[in-house]
Image: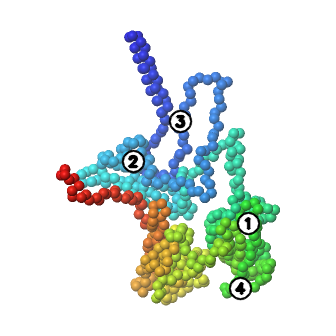
Amino acid sequence: MAAVCAVFYSLLVHLFFLAIATENITSYNSSTTISPDQNSTLNFTEADTSTEPTQFESTTPTSTSSRTEPPEPELPDDPLPMSGHLLQPTTSVAEVCPCDENRDICDMNCCCDRECGLEVALFTDCSVHTVRGSEKLCNREVASYSLATTIDGFSELQSSVQNEKNYDTFCIYSHNRGNGLSHPPPALPTDRNFDLLFEKFSSFTFSSERSQTSAVEPQTSSGHQYGDIMSTSVGNDQRDIFYLPSSGITMDCVDTNPAAFLHKQSSRCSRRVDLLQDCEHLAALRMDTYTSIQIYSDKTTNAVPLPVDVASIVLQSLEGTQTEVQFSEGENLLPVLVSPGLCANVVLEVVYNVKYNPAGKIVNVAASLVLGFVRDAPMPFEQAFEITFSPEDGPEVVVQFSGNPGYVVGMPLVSGYKTTEGLSRSLNPKDTLSLLQSSVDQDCLRGPQVRSPILFGQDSVTGCTLRLSDATNCTLISQVLLDILRGPNLPHFVASFGNSPLEKLLDWVAVKRTFNPQDAQGCGIPLSLHLEIEWTKYGTLVNPQAQIVSVKEVIQTNSSQLALLSGGSSILPVQTSVAFISVSAPASPGYRAMPTIDAKLPFDFFFPFV
């Protein structure tokens, strides 16, 4: 019996040590950390998430003939970013702590360690004082940590996160890559994954030239949906994308901007031309370039190509007057070189109107054009393009809103004017709060001032150049420049929601204006107009709506520059800007109170026991 117990005990000991050895092998993970220097400042640009744990080879001897080849690199697990899907946002610097070396344990003098609580009172200094974002960004976050001494002699943590501006010309305004400004290493092609890589990347082209091949493949769904790219016919049953020119990084026209279904677009861009060579040959100046196309009614293979109907043609003179001309079907007004420095019948503006039915099929496309003269000058001339959508049998929309009910990003603000009868607003959605539209060599006091409406949620900075030929009346110049900055038909109120009715006065926010030229001491010339628009999220937590709560006008003047501007010896920039500031409070879920019982018993309920 003693022998059996001894054998059983030795077996248990052997199994116990075997389990401990197995656990140590499987849970071993090699890692290396570098402790930052004392009083250091770290620039956090991107996290290296591609580092794999160290793999240990087996110590079992193998023969040379049975040695296996190293494994081939596999494809990355993360899918490629698809069009229309944003990547994960970048990591906040407040969540980055380079000195946090031990998990679930407070590191001494590591002020950004989230595990440190009461231990902070014993800290002598912060090992990391500042954590900065990427130096390539125009606005990067800076997290600062410091220690203060209480009256008892203990340390107290003080932390803050602020924005730091980068004034580099080529800084990045915003990016949304989760791994910073780097790209994951590409997969190496092998004989096993070559077909998969070829199918994944063969549909992408890296050429800037427009191909006349089939750029849009027909789909099985019938009608268009919101945001679908419309297609045109290029002959031989091939399709191309319906493009609407717009400005790119500069004001120069980019002819490869696709037009999306039910997405109203309007743009202005500039073209530089040599009239002797381009007047009668450049396609962008010709009327038939925008009217001789055929747009498919839907996305199916048997879709019907619809020609573009010419609704109206307006001729614009050299002085700017416009006259509608009568034209017959099939007539085409081509550009003509009237003189070596003047070209006539050049397309200055194109407006498309697309009608559709409830099934999402396009039933009609009409174009309205403005033709005019272009002079041979070193400055480029400007073209305007717009596309609108309207239902086939639906009523004409008299008043256009910018949301239902909350504002939609990219829609113009709804503004109104105060009259004796109440509030009124213009039927034109562009007749609202606006800013100066920057153009090449735009003088503040000369020529027509081009303006663009303020779009909700889009910050903007524009301006003009102020030149004075000689010393003039300062008060007169100040008032004229103020009217140019504010624009014509100055609105008094802005709707708090995108569909606020005029009869509900409480749904309209008054524009706060505190500047008065008469109150300025001396000569105060307005050099900048800034609009601060505060908005908040209103409604349920599931579907909040954007609501404007305040509109404030801030005007800055400068009276010391007037003497420098006399005689045309100096040039001063004048700018207009708008900023949307979110004042939304953090959402918190609400809970209903527990139900209570409010019941009254008869006085003799417990009779005869009581």
Please name the amino acid that badge 4 sits on: Glu
Q: Secondary structure at mark 1?
A: strand
Where residue 252 sits in the image (x, y, percent)? 66, 70
Distance in Å between CA atoms under marks 4 and 2 = 72 Å
Q: Residue at x 56, y 83 (%)?
A: 445
Q: Are marks 4 and 1 in contact (CB under 8 Å)?
A: no
Distance in Å between CA atoms under marks 1 and 3 = 57 Å
Q: Residue at x 74, y 85 (%)?
A: 325
Within 10 Å of disc 3 (Cα), the crowding (few <14, some 14-19, many 20+) is few
Q: Which residue is mark 1?
A: 296
Res. 528 mark? none
Instruction: Examine the image and state in which quarter residue 352 appears.
Output: bottom right
Compared across the picture, whether 531 is left or right of 195 comes to left
Q: Earlier in the sequence, mark 3 or mark 2?
A: 3
Q: Are marks 1 and 2 in contact (CB under 8 Å)?
A: no
Q: Nearer the viewer, mark 1 or mark 3?
A: 1
Please name the amino acid that badge 2 sits on: Asp
The N terminus, quarter of image? top left
Q: Which residue is mark 2?
A: 113
Q: Earlier in the sequence, mark 1 or mark 2?
A: 2
Where residue 231 sits in the image (x, y, percent)? 72, 64
Q: Earlier in the sequence, mark 4 or mark 2?
A: 2
Q: Residue at x 62, y 78 (%)?
A: 396
Q: Nearer the viewer, mark 4 or mark 2?
A: 4
Q: Secondary structure at mark 3?
A: loop
Please name the amino acid that badge 3 sits on: Thr
Image: 336 above or below 60: below
Q: Nearer the viewer, mark 1 or mark 2?
A: 1
Q: Which residue is mark 3?
A: 54
